[in-house]
Image: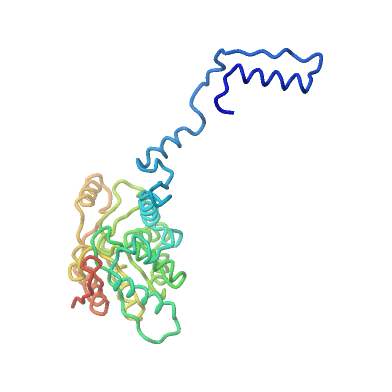
Amino acid sequence: MLGRTREEEREEIAEHIAASGTPADAAKVSYSDDAGRIPLGPARGWRGRQRKAESCELCEGDLWVESSDGVKPCTCRIRRRAQQERRQLKREGWVKGPSLNFSRPPLSSLPSEIGQSIEDFSWQCRDLSSESLLPDLWLVGSRGCGKSSVCGFLAHRLGNRAVVRHCGEMLADLRLAAAQHGESTAEEELDLLTGVPVLVLDDLDRPLLRRVPSSSLTMRESCSSYDVIRLSRILRDRSAAQLPTVVTSTCLPSVCADATLSIKSGDLIRALLSLISGGADPIEDFPGYTEATLRGAMADLATGARVLDLDQEQEFRVAA
């Protein structure tokens, strides 16, 4: 009971012992008010509990808050969900990432017309027996508008009918395959990317190498001439085979080729350091035909593509 004194508790213990009886050799009960053993440190797992309490000032890591209407989920749940999705997409975990739909963030922030267009496109791609030609999709929008989330949605919806890749990772893997196993291995991977029913390329204008490079002088933010040739071949061959392709970019299709062909300052410094140290040029000189090939391939893609602007909430077409 609450409110009992220490003496009352001890009397109750003594009455219980007297009523139940004790053996003759039982030790005499003794009490001490002295402090017991001093703990050597905080309880186990205190660091995790501290991080959890400091994660949110409102719910202190419980993810639920009490209000006048009852217990409701805290706003930090949405923030943690968005962080998890960004981590999955940054690791290119398109299929292993969280399931996405247009009824909850981040896809729910997109205009309803664009969401409906993407869903219609995914349903048409699932009907492989249809003889109707599907137009290509070109998603344009600023960083954080949901382009990568749309790629994740298509990866979940289409499954093995589609290959979803980040443009920089795809080019880096092809470059690594050619260096380790020969150009024939890169050719086989190019044939797979060309013949897949649906190909989704994220960040066509920003070919960033997101995984840790093996060398400090490796290109990380620019295309080499071989990368340009391989990318042009993928786009050109898929257009000739009339297979649908989905690409995303932060700039308009008319200037996407300039952004892809541009050499970033960091890679230019790495190339100069490599030449000074006696190594090979990681960028190589851009021959005129490689630039013309990529511009032509992107122009053909933009001509027949359905361009969706995720920022201005409207659909438009860009002529070549």
Q: Which residue reaches farthest bottom? A: 131
- Residue 170, percent across and down? 36, 62
- Residue 2, percent across and down? 56, 28
The residue drawn where x is 48% and y is 26% is 42
Tell which of 111 and 207 is nearer to you: 111
Tell which of 168 and 82 is nearer to you: 82
| Quarter of the figure with the C terminus | bottom left
Q: Going by the image, does 191 lie left or right of 232?
A: right
Name which quarter of the figure residue 304 lies in.
bottom left
- Residue 130, percent across and down? 42, 85
Tell which of 103 and 259 is nearer to you: 103
Name which quarter of the figure residue 18 lies in.
top right
The residue drawn where x is 42% and y is 47% is 63
The residue drawn where x is 28% and y is 49% is 279
The residue drawn where x is 23% and y is 61% is 142
Task: Give the tally of numbered discs.
Answer: 0
Depicted 150 relative to depicted 208: above or below: below
- Residue 88, percent across and down? 40, 55
Depicted 298 relative to depicted 67: above or below: below
